[in-house]
């Protein structure tokens, strides 16, 4: 039973510390939608998505009102579209646009799954599909895309890495009037997971059932407030404080996820307990790290602080729920975190430090703006570096980078809302072109041989 102190604590978390359910995401299988033509498949896809998720906005609004916990986003993820368009990959854009229309009809903010899985090899239809991404992201509003180019079991598909550098550049160019906004809806993964509720990288894995509810909770402000309450604690006590706080946050997510699944007639999938920041002050992972003792995020000691934070969050989460999944940890998207933005503007937080931080936290180089004239091969090299961290460490890593057309170091891009703003950060000028153009496969590490 909850006592009055628990109730008051939860109210304070919501009203003063930015506790929310960041997203309720319904995963929907599109495999039964495959038809003989792109047009027939698109019609079936639209109908199935609209039918399965027709009540997601109403149900989540009702739950938010009943439990007093804000639910910020309602989203849908679908089977990787390249799989259902294999027979007509040159017309996959028709299905992509049908999904975007379904998202608008449902009133959700994003729909993820215009995706391809090419971590070990790339069939002809998959290459054709990937080539369609720039145009589709430029001509849709709510559709998100991802490509998995590596894994700890298969290695890194460097042909796909090279292709994605070019695709990202083309996507930026196709949305140049919006600071390359299309790239904010495109993620390149290593070790992508099938139950991620967060955009832009969500897709519904082929190992999942017909319809699943995955919930992403978030509470950087709650964690920061808890740390502020123990200003002189040693690191063991600090870790325990974070762990206990993550437990409470995850229990709220478990409650909402279970109820949402029941009311929407779907299975309860997972709770993703990632600390996902927003541009609002007091809702920042960077400010948590600074409260732990850093003068400014990005300085020496940042990676150690982030490692401890991430581990404590995971420990607290798995105590609270047996259904923890997705990415689950601390996100460090530059444009979406006011502390990261300010540190990057000061020149303290740089690309190399961000890369080091991704070795110990969730996902990777996220929402980073780079000069618009950055070569495609350099972007591919950034992807390769990040994928190598994921492959060797057996964790999910990703790159969501925006080569902002016409922008140079020191300029800004501004996407508004949760996507925020970001200073254009420098990249190394020396070329990795010869390495990228070798192609082939970076072999899987020795620890992948576990059978």
Image: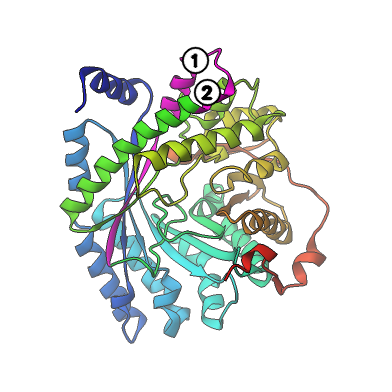
CA distance separating discs 2 and 1: 7 Å
Helix, strand or loop at disc 1? loop
**Residue at x-position 24% and y-position 55%:** 106
Is residue 41 in sight in this rendering?
yes
Is residue 280 in sight in this rendering?
no
**Residue at x-position 21% and y-position 26%:** 2
Mark 1 Cα-neighbour bin, 10 Å: few <14, some 14–19, many ≥20:
few
Mark 2 and mark 1 in contact? Answer it, CB < 8 Å.
Answer: yes
Quadrant housing residue 426: top right
Percent across and percent down for residue 220 are 45, 30
**Residue at x-position 63% and y-position 50%:** 405
Percent across and percent down for residue 314 are 47, 40
In this rendered view, identify the residue nearer to me: 217 or 38.
217
**Residue at x-position 42% and y-position 68%:** 80
Q: Earlier in the sequence, mark 2 or mark 1?
A: 1
Which residue has dot 2 on it? 238
In the rendered structure, the answer to whether residue 171 lies left or right of residue 62 reads right
């Amino acid at each position: 039973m909850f006592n009055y102190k628990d109730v008051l604590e939860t109210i304070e978390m919501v009203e003063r510390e930015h506790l929310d359910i960041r997203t309720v995401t319904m995963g929907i299988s599109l495999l039964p939608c495959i038809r003989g033509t792109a047009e027939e498949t698109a019609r079936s896809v639209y109908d199935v998505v609209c039918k399965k998720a027709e009540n997601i906005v109403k149900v989540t609004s009702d739950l938010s009102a009943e439990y007093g916990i804000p639910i910020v986003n309602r989203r849908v993820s679908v089977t990787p579209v390249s799989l259902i368009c294999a027979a007509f990959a040159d017309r996959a854009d028709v299905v992509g646009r049908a999904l975007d229309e379904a998202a608008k009809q449902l009133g959700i903010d994003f729909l993820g799954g215009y995706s391809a899985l090419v971590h070990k090899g790339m069939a002809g239809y998959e290459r054709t599909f990937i080539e369609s991404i720039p145009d589709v992201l430029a001509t849709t509003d709510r559709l998100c895309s991802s490509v998995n180019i590596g894994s700890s079991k298969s290695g890194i598909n460097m042909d796909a890495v090279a292709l994605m550098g070019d695709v990202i550049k083309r996507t930026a160019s196709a949305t140049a009037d919006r600071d390359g906004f299309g790239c904010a809806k495109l993620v390149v993964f290593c070790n992508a997971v099938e139950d991620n509720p967060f955009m832009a990288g969500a897709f519904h894995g082929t190992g999942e059932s017909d319809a699943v509810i995955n919930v992403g909770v978030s509470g950087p402000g709650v964690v920061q407030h808890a740390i502020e309450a123990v200003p002189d604690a040693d690191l063991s006590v600090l870790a325990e404080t974070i762990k206990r706080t993550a437990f409470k946050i995850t229990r709220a997510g478990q409650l909402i996820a279970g109820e949402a699944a029941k009311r929407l007639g779907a299975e309860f999938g997972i709770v993703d307990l990632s600390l996902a920041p927003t541009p609002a002050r007091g809702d920042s992972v960077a400010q948590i790290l600074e409260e732990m003792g850093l003068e400014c995020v990005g300085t020496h000691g940042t990676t150690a602080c982030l490692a401890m934070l991430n581990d404590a969050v995971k420990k607290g989460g798995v105590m609270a729920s047996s259904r923890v999944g997705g990415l689950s940890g601390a996100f460090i998207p530059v444009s979406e975190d006011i502390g990261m933005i300010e540190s990057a503007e000061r020149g303290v937080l740089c690309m190399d430090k961000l890369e080091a931080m991704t070795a110990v936290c969730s996902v990777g180089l996220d929402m980073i703006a780079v000069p618009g004239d950055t070569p495609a091969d350099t972007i591919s090299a950034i992807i390769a570096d990040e994928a190598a961290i994921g492959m060797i460490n057996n964790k999910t890593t990703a790159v969501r980078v925006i080569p902002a057309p016409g922008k140079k170091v020191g300029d800004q891009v501004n996407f508004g809302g949760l996507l925020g703003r970001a200073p254009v950060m420098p990249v190394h000028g020396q070329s990795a072109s010869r390495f990228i153009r070798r192609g082939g496969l970076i072999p899987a590490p020795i620890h992948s041989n576990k059978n």
